[in-house]
Image (cartoon, rainbow, N blue to C red):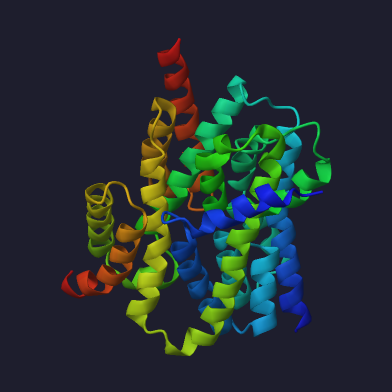
Amino acid sequence: MSISVLLSIIVTSLATYLSRFLGVLSSLKIKETSKIFRWFNCLAYATLAALIARTIIFPVGALLDASYLSRLLVVLLSLGVFFMTKKNFVYPTVFSAISIGAINNFF
Amino acid sequence: MIKKEFFLKGYKSILKPDSPAIALACCFVAIGALLKNVGFNIQESVLSTVLIYALPGSLVMAESILVGASLLSIFIAVWFVNARLYPMAVSLFPLMMDESQPKWKYYLSCHFIAVSAWLIMKSNYETVEKKDRVDFWIGIGSATLSVSVLATALGFYLADYLNKDMLMGLAILNPIYFTCMMVGAMKTLQITLSVILGAILGPVFYFYSPEWSILLGGLVAGSISFLIGEKNVN
C-alpha cells in the first residue's frame, strides 16, 4: 500500500467525518420538535435534491458518455415506471440501468 | 451495549423489497472499477470505502490523485463536497438522542450517515422507541456499509470486464433510485418544496459556482421551503 494513497484516504475520511461529527455535536442541543430542526430537515432534503439534480444534469465520470437528452429521457421514463408500479423503487432503478445504453444510441 | 434485537431489525432493513441494496451495490461496483483505474490496489480500494463511505468524497479523492493535488487541497475539496452531511446529521440525530444511551454510540455511528442509510432511517424511525433508535440506526448503517464494501471489491475485480454502456448503466442507477426515494418522501409541503426547489436551484447555481452550487442551492431552497411551510401552518 503506497504512503501517498494511504494518506489521501485518511485525509479524505477525516474531511468527511468532520461534517458528520459536527452534525452530532449540534444535535445534542437541538430538539426534534424545534423550528431549527424543521429548518435543517428542509436544508437536508433540498441539498440532496440539488446533489442528485447536479449528478444528472452536470455529471462526472461514466455518465458523461450519455447525452443530455438521453439522461433526461431516462429520468422521465423511470419516474413514469415508478408511478405505474405503485411507487416501487426497484423497477424504475433496474429499468434505468438497462435502458440508458439503448436510449443513448438513439439520441 | 448495543441491543441485538434492534441492531438486527436495522440490519435486515437492507433485505426489504424497497431497499437501496441494489442501487447502492451498483454504485460502489462503479467506484471499485474507478479506483482500480486510478491505480489503487484491492486493499486500498476496500479501505477507502470503509473509512470514507461517501460517494462524492471518493470521486473527488480519485480525481485529486489523478491531477496530483496536495493533501490540504484534497481535505478542503472533500470537506466542501461532503458538507451536506452536516444538515443530514442535524436532521436525523435529534430523533434518536436519548439520555439512557452513551454518547460514544452517536459519535461513532455518525460515520454511517450517507443518503441511503439516512433515507431508510427517516422512513422507519417511528417503528422503534426513541431509546432504542440508535441501535436500530447502527444496524442500518452496518448493513449499508457491508453492501458498499463487498460491491467495491466486486467492482475492483470486474473493472476489466465492464464496457462503456455497463458503466453508464451503473452510474445512472443511483441518481434514479434517489430521485424516486425523494419523490416518495414528498408527503408534507415543506419537504415537497425542498425537493423541487433544491432540484431546480442546485443546477442553476452551478452556472455561478460549480463548487458551491449544491450547498448554496440547498441552503436557499431549504430556507425558502421552510419559511413557506411555517407560514402555511400558522
Dividing the image into 4 quarters, which one contains the C terminus of chain B? top left
Q: Residue at x 36, y 72 (%)?
A: B168
Depth check, front residue: A26 or B151? B151
Depth check, front residue: B26 or A42? B26
Is residue B82 shown above or below B152? above
Q: Residue at x 72, y 40 (%)?
A: A24
Which percent across, then down, holds residue B225? Answer: 44, 27
Depth check, front residue: B66 or A95? A95
Q: Is residue B90 shown left or right of residue A49?
A: right
Is residue B7 shown above or below A105? above
Q: Residue at x 76, y 37 (%)?
A: A25
Residue found farthest to the top: B234
- Specify the quadrant of the image occupied by residue B48: bottom right
Q: Is residue A60 shown left or right of residue A98?
A: right
Residue A64 visible here: yes
Q: Is residue B111 shown left or right of residue B16?
A: right
Is residue B135 shown above or below A8? above
Residue B140 visible here: no
Which percent across, then down, holds residue A15? Answer: 71, 56
Q: Residue at x 50, y 41 (%)?
A: B123
Residue found farthest to the left: A106
Q: Is residue B160 shown left or right of residue A103?
A: right
Which percent across, then down, holds residue B187? Answer: 39, 32
- Specify the quadrant of the image occupied by residue B66: bottom right
Residue found farthest to the bottom: B160
Which percent across, then down, holds residue A95? Answer: 28, 64
